[in-house]
Structures are given as C-alpha cells and as structure tokens.
Amino acid sequence: MFQDMNDIIHVLPDTVANQIAAGEVIQRPSSVVKELVENSIDAGAKHIQVIIKDAGRTLIQVIDDGKGMSETDARLAFERHATSKLKTAEDLFTLATMGFRGEALASIASVAQVELRTRRAEDEVGTCINIAGCQVESQDPVSCPVGCNFSVKNLFFNVPARRKFLKSNKAEFSHIEQDFLRIALVYPDIHFELRHTVTSLHPEEVVCYNLPLAGLRERIVAVFGKQINTSLLSVAADSSMAKIYGFVGKPEDANRQRTKQYFFVNGRFMKHPYFHKAVVQAYDRMLQDGTSPDYFLYFEMDPECIDVNIHPTKTEIKFENESEIWKILMASVKEALGRFSVVPSIDFDNDSMLEIPPYKNDLTADEPIINVDPSYNPFNVGKTAPSHSSGTGGYKRPKEDWEQLYAGFENDKSGFPSVDMASDEHVFSSRLSSDEEEESSASSDFESMVTSSQMPMQSTLFQDDAKPTTFCFQLRNKYILTTVRSGLMCIDQHRAHVRILFDQYLTNFKEKRGVAQKLVFPILIDLTPSEMSILEEVKDDLHYLGFDISDMGNSTVAVNGVPATDSNIDVKEFIYKMLNSVHDPNIDVKGEMAERLALSLAHVAAIPSGKVLHKDEMESIISRLFSNANHEYTPDNKKIFVLLQETDLEKMFR
C-alpha cells in the first residue's frame, strides 16, 4: 500500500507508540513496581525482593525465584502486546493471572534503562539483556540464579517533562509502599521484601518490610502491627455467586483515616465504593460521625462473572451480579459484628482477672456460727463482760460510768484549749476580710491583665466595653460562661485549651526548649515499618515538644518521657494519631510538620468536653486564652467562643 504525499494519516513509530502507552500504564515509579511484582507472581515466585533507590528515580529492582525465561522469551517479552496469557479474545473472560495485555515491559523499556537477568531451571546459563528507550543495546549469556532480576534505572530519562512532574521522594515512595502492600496482603504464601535507600540522606539500605510466609491474619498483623490483632473480626460467607472471607475491625476502633480498607477479588486489589457502602451500612449506627471501619475482604468467584479490563490500572472491576453480592457482603459483615456483640472475647491470660475456682458437686459449705451472750449488759458498771469465743481474753468495762466521765470533763479543762467566742469571731471576720481583699486584688489583676499592653487588641470584642471579668461558671461541663462589659461570653473549654497548648508547643518547638518529664515505667509501642520510618523523620521534632523516645528494635519504641505540662496524656493514642496525621505524602517535613505535631499533641492533651472544672481552672483558661494574639479560632479554624451582647439579650425579652 503506497501513501500519497498529501495523505495526512500515518502510522506512529514503535518508540512513540510505546511512550504513549507508557503514559497510561507507567504513571509513576509505583506503576513499575506493581507491574514487575505481578509478573513475578504469575511466574510462580515464592520469594520476591523489591529494592528501591531515591523513591524509584534512580533504581527499581525486582528479584524473584520464579520459573524464569529462555533467551528468546526474554527478548520477545519487551515487544508490544507480547503475552503468554492470551491467545483468543474469549480468554479475556476467563482470566486467572495478574497481567495479560503485554504492554508493561514494552512501556517500561520505552521510558527507562532496563536490564534483565533471567534463567530457567533446565538451562545451564541465563541471559542478560539491556534496553534503553526501546533500543536493544546488548543480549549476552550470563551466570545467574533461576528466576528473573529486573533493574529499571533512571525512569523517564528520555521524557524530562514527565520526570519533572514527579513529586517528592516521600510522596513517591508512599505510592510504592501502597501498591506493594496491596499485593502482599493478598498473597500471604509468598515471602515479600521491600528495601529503600535515599542516597541524599543516608547511603545504607533500610528494610521497610520483611514479610515471610504466614497465614492471612498473621500477614495483616505483620504489616499493620500487633495492635490491630485484637480488633479483627472474622468474616465468612459462601454462596453460589461468590465466596467472601476476611476481617473487619471492631466499631470502637473505627477512625477517620481510610488507610486500612482493602477489597480483593480473585487475588487482585480493587476499588469499589458501592461495596464500601455495604460494609459501612452493616455497622448500623455503631460508628461515630465521620469515622470508617477497617476491613480486609476477599472475594473468590467465577472469572466469567467479572470484567477486569475496564481500566488501564485494573483496579476498577465490573461485577455481573453486583446488587446480589452487595446483599451477601452486608449480611456477612453483620453476622461477624453480631458474633462479636453476643459473645465477647475473654482474655484468659490477663493477670488482673479474678480467679474463679471450678464448681464441685460434692462440696458443701459450713454455716457460720456466731456466739451471742444474751445476759451481757454494757451498762453494768464495774463488771467484767463474759469473754466471746472469737475474742482474745474478754472485754472489761471501765470502772467509771458516763456521769463520772462527764463530771471530770466539767471539773478539769486543763487538757483542752480555751475558746474565746469573741476572739474567734474577730479572727473569722478578719479572715473573711482578707479573703475579700485577695479576691478583689485578683479581680483587679485580671482586669489590668486584660487591659494591659500585653493583651492583643485586634478583635473589637475586647475593647474597653467588652473586657472579661472573674465571674464565670461551667455549663454542661463543656462551656465556660463569663461576663464581659457588653454581654455574655460562651467559651468552648476544649477548643480554648487546644489553642493555648498549640501556641505553647509551637513556641517550644521554634525555640528548641521542650522539657520532658521522665516516666517511672517507659511505654512500649509497636509500630509498622512504615510508621517507624515516619517516626525517624519527626523524632527530633518530637524531642523539641518534650518527648523522649528511644528505638528498642523490631519496630518497637519506648517512650521514656512526655511533655512536662501534660504527663497524663494517652501516649499511645497520641503517637498513633500523630503518625496518621503526618502520613500525608505531600506534607513538607520541615515546614508544616511542626504545626501538625503540635496540633496532634494539643488535641490529645487538651481538657476534654465533659470534664468538671474548678473556678481557678476556668479563670486560668480565660486569662491564658486572651493573652494570646490568636484567641478567636483554633489552629484548624474552628470558632472558640461566641458573644451574646446586651442588645441581643434585650431583644430576646421584648
């Protein structure tokens, strides 16, 4: 077929076509990890190592012990649409493997420098092939173990525009970690390792995850830490349409983070908002507003009933009987929650539990015998009372009767201090006067503090016509009511304390003068490898806030000291909330990190709603709040107080 010079339709070169395909398949370094690890699983690997440098910019290496490839297969694997999974179009509806389209390796080789070392078990030597930008540079025999060793270097080296739009190392590695876990959680019978090196920070390699062969529950615990083990409830449902199994979290452990919510179908991770709604509805008013439960749910069904080829990343899957599966899913989760509610688990290894002896049919209890002397009279003066059987030697009445004792009291007062009522009244009145003077002095000090030059005057609420006074009381153990010159002020005690503590922590952080109060017994906290890496980044920042934390090894840390002003905070709750809040991959570690840490600590350490406060505590909150320039809103922009002015009150009573 010949083309005329005026024809405008032409076929793209393979290099350009592969780069266009790479734009759909290889979006970021995590896409390379996903494709290579899935290929290793299809090859029957039982041990897969993922080695990352600089969040995938410099190197992505995947090593497996699968069946490997021959010399010819190694070369053909990089051709576009080359696959061993499909032969006819009908095979698309009976897929039982992870990859099938044959675009991954061709797309990767078009935007990176790739080296593949592979050998089959029946071959004496393997083959090594080097490709850069779709161009085969070399293919030579090489000595290597059975399996495949892919090294992808300098991703997007020939597409600088794409490389420029990659995010920070923390953000990109977060995506790699996410895709890695989505595969590791569904294949507990495979040993996975993830290692990362950031050459700009430290040259040594960090083992982020080492997940040996285990059961499904053990794999989840190995990934997310020991603390999740007690929260998992088993789910099991088997029907003609689908088999559903896995775990859901207890209602009290639900949180606002949605990092532990996974659906898998036939060994493949999927996103499905419709099924997520089924899980949430199964909890039926057991969740607090804004929280979502954790779940790890696995579907096994006929491949002909699903379509995995509707999205390039294969994370969105179409179900043939979606509404029926929705009902089965919700019923199975409800059943799991019902079993938990009806039969709560008992920890028999808890040392604090009461020891209940076993019941014995032939055991009888003796009726207690109480000996009573009916002839005993305590008013028999000078007589000795009979001894009780349970006593020690009997009881003897004193010789004097009560009249003699009273007479002695009246006649001899030398043993008691004399009381002058007039003098006592004088002391009482003087003490009352001094108390009134002290309260008046405190009131004047507070007034002077409010009106002093140290008090910020940005808000018009605190000019001379609206100064708080020392009169205050608590409403429903949640709000502090106090009078100002222009009306009545209502302060949210928790938000006010959050504002106070946040500014205090931020000041300590900036001035690097956090003071730690040592704990008598250190608090041990188990973390995941991902959480440990985040903690290492913020360890110095936590030190400036007043925390003394040491690494105990095996992803366990010991908290030896806490901020001196907040020794009664729940340390574990703060650490877990803090790690969740700073897990955002787009956060600037040295910029916003300090504010996030301070805010997380302030929310945990602040006075909660529902706590009874004394008058001096309320006055302290008021004075500390309004000595701050930012007293109207919390750091997360929530209103701290409302003012009911006198004119508003007058309108209400008209």
Image: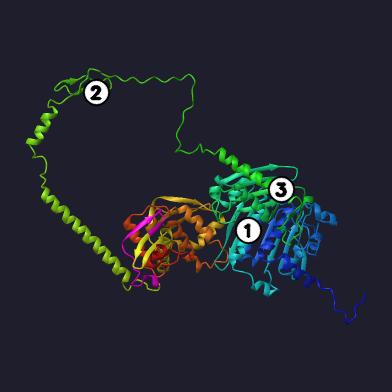
To which residue does mark 1 refer?
178
Q: Quadrant of residue 512?
A: bottom left
Numbered badge on residue 392: 2
Residue type, mark 2 in image: Thr
Where does the magenta region start and end?
460-480
State the CA–CA distance, disc 3 to disc 2: 78 Å
**Res. 441 in view:** yes
Numbered badge on residue 457: none
**Crowding near the residue tagged with mark 1, few <14, some 14–19, many ≥20 C-alpha atoms within 10 Å:** some
Judged by depth in the image, the label closer to the viewer, 3 or 2, is 3
Q: Which of marks 3 and 1 is nearer the N terminus?
A: 1
Residue type, mark 1 in image: Gln
**Res. 48 in view:** no
What residue is shown at x 85% (from left), y 79% (from top)?
8
Marks 3,1: beta carbons within 8 A: no
Element under disc 2: loop
Image position, residue 329 (x, y; %): 67, 47
558 vs 459: above or below: above
Query: Would you say 485 lies left or right of 634 here?
Result: left
Q: What colouring style does the render use?
A: rainbow
Q: Which of marks 3 and 2 is nearer the N terminus?
A: 3
Q: Is residue 288 magenta?
A: no
Image position, residue 417 (x, y; %): 11, 44
Element under disc 3: helix
State the CA–CA distance, disc 2 to disc 1: 76 Å
Viewer-closest of 152 and 288:
288
Viewer-closest of 224 and 269:
269
Judged by depth in the image, the label closer to the viewer, 3 or 1, is 3
To which residue does mark 3 refer?
325
What residue is shown at x 53% (from left), y 58% (from top)?
580
337 vs 110: above or below: above
The C terminus: image quadrant: bottom left
